[in-house]
Amino acid sequence: MSQDSTRIALAARIHVALRRKTGRVTDTEWLAQDPTYATEIIRMCRAEGDAELVGLADKLDAAMQTLRPRVVRPVAPPPVAVVPAWADSSMQLEAERERERKIEQRYVGRLR
């Protein structure tokens, strides 16, 4: 049995059970194809608390997984090391001194 026919069969069974137990009428084709509508009907079936409806809702929920978009959660960026303000200024000062030494060596080397 294909996924489509499984969803349609479950939607039809839910339609009959809901109509018999609550008087609610559903659209079986829409229920089998639209994940948003199916999610609401599944929620409603579970809220009724009836064992048959809950069982059918669980089966339909599993069958609808193929139609629902996969949620890709973003990966958290790596933690950033917190550097104290005094360390940052001393590192900048050291980097600036190193640059000046390199420039001076290059200048003196060209004069010879």
Image (cartoon, rainbow, N blue to C red):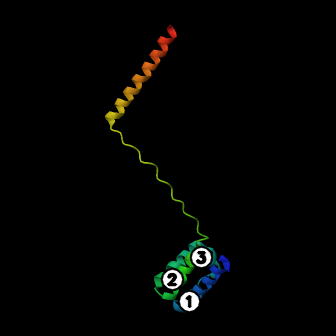
User: From what the image shows, is residue 110 above or below residue 81?
Assistant: above
Judging by the rendered image, the residue that carries numbered circle 1 is 17
Does dot 3 land on a helix, a strand or a loop?
helix
Left or right side of 96 for 70: right
| Label whose residue precedes the other's in the sequence (2 or 3) | 2
Q: Nearer the viewer, mark 3 or mark 1?
A: 3
Judging by the rendered image, the residue that carries numbered circle 2 is 45
For badge 1, the amino acid type reads Ala
Does dot 1 land on a helix, a strand or a loop?
helix
Tell me the CA gap for discs 2 and 3.
15 Å
Does dot 2 land on a helix, a strand or a loop?
helix
Residue at far top of view: 112
Q: Nearer the viewer, mark 2 or mark 3?
A: 3
* Residue drawn at 53 percent across, 81 percent down: 57
Q: Position of residue 31 (x, y in %)?
A: 61, 78
User: From what the image shows, is residue 7 above or below residue 110?
Assistant: below
Q: Are marks 2 and 3 in contact (CB under 8 Å)?
A: no
Q: Nearer the viewer, residue 81 or 85?
A: 81
Q: Quadrant of residue 91?
A: top left
Label 1 neighbour load within 10 Å: few <14, some 14-19, many 20+: some
For badge 2, the amino acid type reads Cys
Q: Position of residue 98 (x, y in %)?
A: 42, 23
Tell me the CA gap for discs 3 and 1.
18 Å
| Label whose residue precedes the other's in the sequence (3 or 1) | 1
Residue at far bottom of view: 20
* Residue drawn at 60 percent across, 83 percent down: 10
Judging by the rendered image, the residue that carries numbered circle 3 is 63
Label 2 neighbour load within 10 Å: few <14, some 14-19, many 20+: many
Q: Position of residue 17 (x, y in %)?
A: 56, 89
